[in-house]
Image (spheres, rainbow, N blue to C red):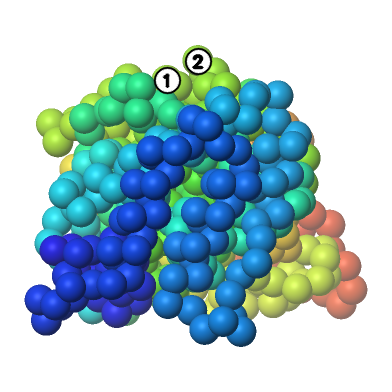
Amino acid sequence: MTQFSTEIDHLLDMFTQKNLNGSANPIYEKNHSLLQDYLKNYRNRGVDFLETIILEILNNGREKTDEIENLPGVRKFFKNSTETEQELMEKFRIVVEFALRAEDLLPERIYRLVDDVMSASFSQEQCACLLAWMWFDTRKNRSFFEILTSTHPISIEKIKFLLHFFSETWIQMPRGVVSFLRIKSENFMENQFEKLKESKKLSEISIRNDLLIEETALCTQVDFANKHIGGGVLRLGGVQEEIRFLMCPEMMVSMLICDKMEPDEAISIVGAQVYSSYTGYSGKLKWRELQPKDALQNQYRDKFQRIQTECLAINAIKFFGHPSRNLRTQLQEQNIQKELTKAAVGFAAHGPDFDGVPIFSGWWGCGAYSGNKPLKFLIQLMAASIANRPLVMCTFGESKVGNRCRQMKKRLEMDGITVGGLYDLLLKVPILDGAHDEMHVFDEIERILCERAGGN
């Protein structure tokens, strides 16, 4: 009997035959009967039947006054689809099949990654079973409920991503493993940074204007994460983190087993397969059949049969106001320390085993989080250097900023600046009243270095 910690006991109630005390579980009996009914009758039925089955499971055990009455997202998906109703019913059959397999395939206990529990691994088939359960649950950030009840265009696209995942795994189930690791390093600045900062030279960097993070392989791909991993992927979110999770739905298992990230924590996912590509961004996001450039990472597996690509979730500080006007706050030492800790804890998580393995990142904590791009580049450069790993910055087409990053690195190298030296330089950047140019941090560091050279 599969057992979870309290956070996901509701799934246990839904899909296990017996309660923890050994008595029969009436919720399971009804749910099992409903799913079997779908398998027996779906060929001759349509969306009304599907909606009824899902609603009966969602309402199983609910008070009458709390019952859910309809699933408008499901209905709109059927209405807008270019596939026939029967083709779509067949796709939902696969979801039901995986939900019914769960009891036999999942381990007896599944613990959340809290306290002393730091890691968990699942076969890709077990991941599919866990994701199948999420169609029949209502909890926020733990289910597909908000997708199924939303008629927003992005919700309809998300159903496409999810059903494609189930179809692909049903046709040919990958025999790999996906690992989830919660990384924590208490007192990083005192215990590690202070010891290493003067001896650590700055890592090699590469600036790529023509490459997206998800088009890489045999590396760490940085997930510009929300403190709640997965961000808005189960709601209306459609930016970097959400897109990554839609391309690789096995990553969503982390949302079942991981709590909110603390300031000194990161989450590593190794082995998640890419099943879909995409076009557009945010509200214009569209599902696309898997393209060769995105499928590249699926080719390589390690001795544990995990795909050899790590998704590293690190959440930046969310600043407020325009980046040109909040730079004073960003350059406060406590904020630099927080973000350096977050990035370094993640980049160094696997120790010497990952020495030399490239980190592919970009404008982490910029965009919606209002971070300054030059500052975020330098923070990530320090973190990568502490971890003995090269840093590859994907500029998302912002070649001007990318070129300045390259020039800044050359100047720091020419002056023999260490990680500690760069940290001290950041604390010396003067802040004026009013708005700052985006390159203010670079300009001021170059000015300080020129003054030093002139003074010698």
Residue farthest to the top?
Answer: 292
Task: Tell which of 387 and 275 is nearer to you.
Answer: 275
Q: Position of residue 125 (x, y in %)?
A: 26, 39
Q: Quadrant of the N terminus?
A: bottom left
Can residue 393 be seen by looking at this rendering? Answer: no
Task: Tell which of 439 and 114 is nearer to you.
Answer: 114
Q: Position of residue 301 (x, y in %)?
A: 24, 27
Badge 1 marks a residue whose secondary structure is: helix
Task: Tell which of 188 and 122 is nearer to you.
Answer: 122
Question: Could you tell me how many numbered marks the image carries?
Answer: 2
What residue would you read off at disc 1?
296
Q: Are marks 2 and 1 in contact (CB under 8 Å)?
A: yes
**On screen, 67 above or below 204?**
below
What residue would you read off at disc 2?
292
Mark 2 residue crowding within 10 angstroms, few (<14) / some (14–19) / many (20+)? few
> Three-letter amino acid code at disc 1?
Leu
Q: Position of residue 135 (x, y in %)?
A: 47, 54
> Three-letter amino acid code at disc 2?
Pro
| Residue at x 44%, y 29% (from the top left corner) | 167
Q: Position of residue 378 (x, y in %)?
A: 56, 54
Mark 1 residue crowding within 10 angstroms, few (<14) / some (14–19) / many (20+)? some
Q: Is residue 100 left or right of residue 454?
A: left
Q: Quadrant of the C terminus?
A: bottom right
